[in-house]
Amino acid sequence: MYKDYTDYPEIDEINHVIAQVARDYKIPFWIYNKSSLCKSKEYFKDLTHLNSKGADEFSKIFAGDVKKNLPENIYTK
């Protein structure tokens, strides 16, 4: 999100609505648009799309969040 979407006041409202729906359905929802990764030109091929370096870095962050939020016994079933 190199085009700094944190400057748009409606993004917080949008994230709030999505977070509420996610809570209602017990679905994890993580907000990444305020991540430092999203503010660095080196990770983007244009204003809104990650390049391969950005995709690699984001994938690591996302995988870590997924791993932290998986039930501990997911692999024992």
Image: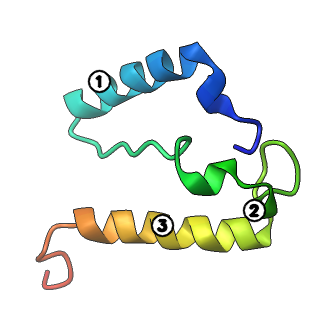
The residue located at (29%, 24%) in the rendering is 20
Q: How is the image coloured?
A: rainbow
Residue identifier under label 2:
43
The residue located at (58%, 64%) in the rendering is 58
As measured in the structure, the alpha-carbon distance from the residue carrying label 3 to the one carrying label 2 is 13 Å
As measured in the structure, the alpha-carbon distance from the residue carrying label 3 to the one carrying label 1 is 23 Å
Question: Closer to the camera, 60 or 24?
Answer: 60
Q: Of the residues shown, which amino acid type is indicated by label 2?
A: Tyr
Q: Of the residues shown, which amino acid type is indicated by label 3?
A: Ile
Q: Mark 3 and 1 residues: CB-CB less than 8 Å, in contact? A: no
As measured in the structure, the alpha-carbon distance from the residue carrying label 1 to the one carrying label 2 is 30 Å
Residue identifier under label 1:
20
Q: Check residue 46 in the rendering and tell me which mark sits there, or answer none.
A: none
Percent of width and height locating residue 55: 68, 67
The residue located at (72%, 55%) in the rendering is 40
Hey, which quadrant is residue 69 in on the image? bottom left
Query: In the image, is 31 to the left or to the right of 68?
Result: right
Which quadrant, please, contains the C terminus?
bottom left
As drawn, the residue found furthest toward the bottom would be: 76
Which quadrant, please, contains the N terminus?
top right
Residue identifier under label 3:
61
Mark count: 3
- Classify 10 Å Cα crowding around label 2: few (below 14), some (14-19), many (20 and above): many
Upstream in the sequence, badge 3 or badge 2? 2
In front: label 3 or label 1: 3
Dot 2: what SS?
A: helix
Query: In the image, is 7 to the left or to the right of 47?
Result: left
- Classify 10 Å Cα crowding around label 1: few (below 14), some (14-19), many (20 and above): few
